[in-house]
Image (cartoon, rainbow, N blue to C red):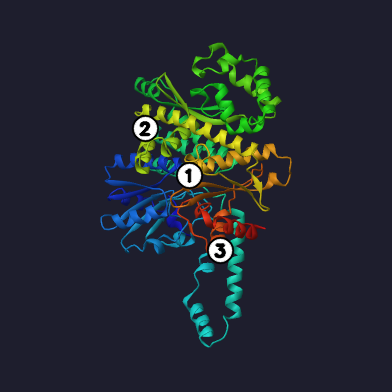
Amino acid sequence: MYQHTLFGAYINAIILLLLQRVLLLVASDVDALCACKILQALFQCDHVQYTLVPVAGWQELETAFLEHKDQFKYFVFINCGANVDLLEILQPEEDTFFFICDSHRPINVVNVYNDTQIKLLVKQDDDLDVPAYDDIFRDEEDEEEDSEDESDGSEPSEKRRRFEEEVIERTMKRRQRREWEARRCSAMVMFDLAWIMSKDLNDMLWWAIVGLTDQWVQDKITQMKYVTDIGILQRHVSRHNHRNEDEENSLSIDCMRIAFEYDLRLALYQHWSLYESLCNTSYTSASLKLWSVQGQKRLQEFLADMGLPLKQVKQKFNSMDVSLKENLREMIEESANKFGMKDLRVQTFSIHFGFKNKFSASDIVYATTSLMENIEKEDSETTNFIKALDSLSRGNLDKLHQGLDLAKKQLRAIQQTVASCICTNLVISQGPFLYCSLMEGTPDVKLFSKPVSLCLLSKYLLKSFVCSTKNKRCKLLPLVMAAPMDVEQGTVIMVGIPPEVESSDKKNFFGRAFEKAAESTNSRTLHNHFEMSIIELKTEDRSKFLDALISLLS
């Protein structure tokens, strides 16, 4: 069944790809950037000519294809293209081929069963759990029989109606059970490809780690899925970073070394002050309720319980006394358990460049994201994309440090906005979901016109709201959040976030709900983002759109 989508079955097609001139279309997220870096390294190994085009949405993807379809016959899509009927949208020539590595789910069944032009880069053990071929594409004879029935002027046959109902029912059951569990990190898929071809390098492994960490930071995968994939990567880390007596190998390890470790769930704390990190990390801020006076008192009590002087925690981490830093993690974990923060320790990886520079995988994720959505300079999205891509190379530490500085500003802006929304009761219950809208003139509102930043804000806000509210029902509701996108054109960007519950499997059904609400009200919307749960909407249509969404989800 659809064996062409599996690594083992189309490795010859991959080798053929490495002999062609290729157009590389890459989405604007960190996982896609990491997968792109791995593929670029593979292309360089085999001297493959390629052109890289960043695409932020469906419109840019279609435009890029139309501009380049005459020069290229081989296209590689990273984190875009799998969840739509690509051939119907692009209308390519028959001698055009698409290789798709996309973490978005569900994958469109037409892409799965197309065995000529579309090659899905999917891991061997992936269970896409798509309906059977015969359930979707019926025999021509059956179609002719139904068409004859209808041509007689009668209603569609009872047999056909029953058949369609059964297919819909089976498909819905599959989707409820499986479609969101299959989300895979594209960078890990690309690394597996490099490993199968015996071309994997330590740099590629690090990019795979950063790609996985991005999906965890963005809350796109479950904790169990994250821990499972960490275990897989840990074996590769041991293989690539073991020490032996060989002098040349020892030198390479000194230059770049990846290590598995249990670290603190504190954002950027090794490049910030411990105090700032505690205040601007979503987990600690929500747990301690730092937007309130009582929360600030709890923070002081937390620091006192650890026995850390305020002077020490408010200076840069690198400047703290060595004696305090030696047992810092154990001290923080012990006190965190007393204050209800039992998940402050997390499995992760760190990278050492020589003896001076050390970064955790989450540091790289925050830095790269902030470079990609930088609003301080009036650079184009393509320029920001290239800067973010360059920051992933170990030869560009200056850009990485620039990204870390931007990330600190982004995290501060998010936490200040979260505090403002909660203190002014901007989060309201609309029945089947919570709703929050940022008004024009809100500090840092321009930052939240960017999709990744808005998603981060929404997730942090929902986590904080769940910790602050006493309404048990509200704790189980998803969140819809809106922010001004373009004031001149009168548009807002809207995102839907699944409920913040421990048993959450990260299912997000807002994509289809948004489409139906827009159709039923004729709202002027733009479904341009690869994440289906993000849409753009005319400001004056927002009220009727929300009414339809409430009615639909009630």
Mark number for residue 393? 2
Are the two marked residues, 3 and 2, in contact with CB atoms closer than 8 angstroms?
A: no
User: Which residue lies at the image location 63% right of the left edge and 22% below the top edge?
Assistant: 332
Question: Upstream in the sequence, badge 1 or badge 2?
Answer: 2
Q: Point out the frontmost of discs 1 and 2.
A: 1
Question: Quick check: 475 left or right of 193?
Answer: right
Query: Mark 1 and mark 2: span between their CA atoms?
Result: 28 Å
Q: Point out the frontmost of discs 3 and 2.
A: 3
> Callout 3: helix, strand or loop?
helix
Residue where numbered disc 3 is placed: 521
> Callout 1: helix, strand or loop?
helix
Are the two marked residues, 1 and 2, in contact with CB atoms closer than 8 angstroms?
A: no
Q: Amino acid at mark 2?
A: Ser
Q: Amino acid at mark 1?
A: Ser
Residue toward you, 296 or 148:
296
Q: Where does residue 511 sit, x and y in percent of width and height?
A: 54, 55
Query: Mark 3 and mark 1: span between their CA atoms?
Result: 24 Å
Question: Quick check: 190 left or right of 470?
Answer: left
Question: Upstream in the sequence, badge 3 or badge 2?
Answer: 2
Near mark 2 (Cα within 10 A), the count class, few <14, some 14-19 or many ≥20, is some
Q: Where does residue 186 sit, x and y in percent of width and height?
A: 45, 45
Mark number for residue 449? 1
Q: Amino acid at mark 3?
A: Thr
Q: Where does residue 356 sit, x and y in percent of width and height?
A: 42, 19
Q: Is residue 129 visible?
A: no
